[in-house]
Image (cartoon, rainbow, N blue to C red):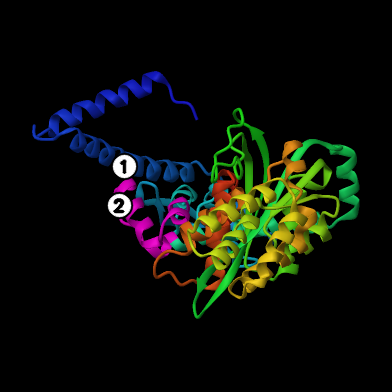
Amino acid sequence: MKFSTKMIETMTGIIVEELERVETGDEGIMGLETNIRSMLKEIGGQALSRYLSRKNEEEEGEQITCECSGQAQFHSWREAVIISVFGRVRYKRRYYVCPKCHKGQMPRDEQMGIAPGEVTAGLAKLMGLAGVEVAYEEAKRIVEQFLLFEVNDNTVRKETEQFGVLQEEEEKRWEQTSQDEKRLQTRLREKGIQKGRLYGSIDGAIVPLHGEWRELKCLAWYRVETIASYQAHRHHKKQVGEQTHLQAHQISYACDIREAEAFGSLLWATGWKRLADLHEELIFICDGAAWIWRLVEKYYPKAIQIVDWYHASEYLSPVAEAAFGRDTPQAKEWLEQARTDLWEGRIQELIRDCQRLALIPAAAEAVHKAVTYYQNNEKRMDYARLRSQGYLIGSGTIESACKQIAGHRLKLAGARWSLDGSVQTAKARAAWLSGDWEALALKRAILPLAA
């Protein structure tokens, strides 16, 4: 919506005059800013009230067509209250009653997406955004500081979770559509093979529910771009472990608390949304969890599989410490060589080096864990070849997703969630991080029409 320069200049002049009239002389810039914001809040509330009332006055006719095909008759003017970004706003609207089905109707409310007595879509958008960032009580205080009126923390929770519900409904539509064989064939003809590489990563984070802990499974779809010349960091004087020239971008997230098989449907549906199955190259970088690779092989059998280098390298320090002692020269020397072998993809050589240390009783358990991990994932750990072909080999993107969704929001001190509340809040936060907030806000704006 564009406003005329003349109108803005006129209103600005009026505001300045009013500020000069009430000025006490002791306000600093912060006080002046607060006064202007308070004035604009009052102006906005009254303008919204008058606008809504006037639009109702413009309604013509004493009857409207009802959904039941009857003719609803004008009954009376009724006052309503909405909670908007300007606070509580009162307005009057026409009220109709259908003599056939006896249903009361407010056509202008329905047209504008207004639910009397409820939060407006604009305020819901802001409340939900605060709610995905911090605890609901803290979000309430933040909203109050920005909007200069009191809100209820339970309302913040309700609106945040509603965004999660909307995201969940969207994902269910994707799941249904992505299973339609005819649509998949049509999509292939229309979209064709997608150029370039698309990456996917899956992981889980344990979150606190009432009386138990559950795993929030997270996934990320993303592309990888080159950002600078390669200058690898040094680990124990060896250039291993970093790919500072590669960076994830165009990231989209999804999450849920489901069993692995059920989560596979979300994996396929979100991949369908990103055209994962149509890409020239699809690459999955994940840790060694068996359930993850079963899903990848089931839904994307042609994908390139890479075990995250950092997860793989974490098995080496316990072996070195158990065999030689913590921080001893021998442990550091063995660990340096072992990490280099892993970085270069010499997995069989690494396995043999670990197995030699199994003769040391204190190291047997750590060696067993490392060797089992490497044997199970050897085909996914050809790191030298993968690096030479320009692939990312670290799953930092999904690690970040788990921290940003589960760690940052769900695992706050003292937090205990209901199952639905945790999933809905997590989905809302994932949508925000994915850049989908505006699309959800538009869906939230038409909720009263669907009610």
Mark 1 / mark 2, whichever is N-terminal: 1
CA–CA distance in space, label 1 to label 2: 9 Å
- Residues in magenta, as a range: 127-156
Find numbered disc 1 in the image and state the secondary structure of the residue it sits on: helix
Query: Which residue has dot 1 on it?
Result: 41
Residue 437 sits above or below residue 211 on the image: above
Relative height, residue 2 to residue 270 (above, below):
above
Instruction: Write the residue at 71% across / 45% down.
Output: 344
Residue 117 makes an appearance in the image: no
Q: Residue at x 61, y 28 (%)?
A: 229
Residue 136 % position (x, y)? 40, 61
- Residue 38 lies left or right of residue 173; in this view the side is left
**Horizontal side, residue 181 vs residue 217: left or right:** right
Residue type of the residue flagged with mark 2: Phe
Which mark, by number, is residue 149?
Answer: 2
Residue 251 seen from this side: yes
Kindly indicate the quadrant of the structure image that contains residue 256.
bottom right
- Rendered location of residue 36, percent (x, y): 25, 35
Residue sitting at the far left: 25
Answer with the quarter of the image where residue 315 lies.
bottom right
Rendered residue at 39%/47% (across/down): 85
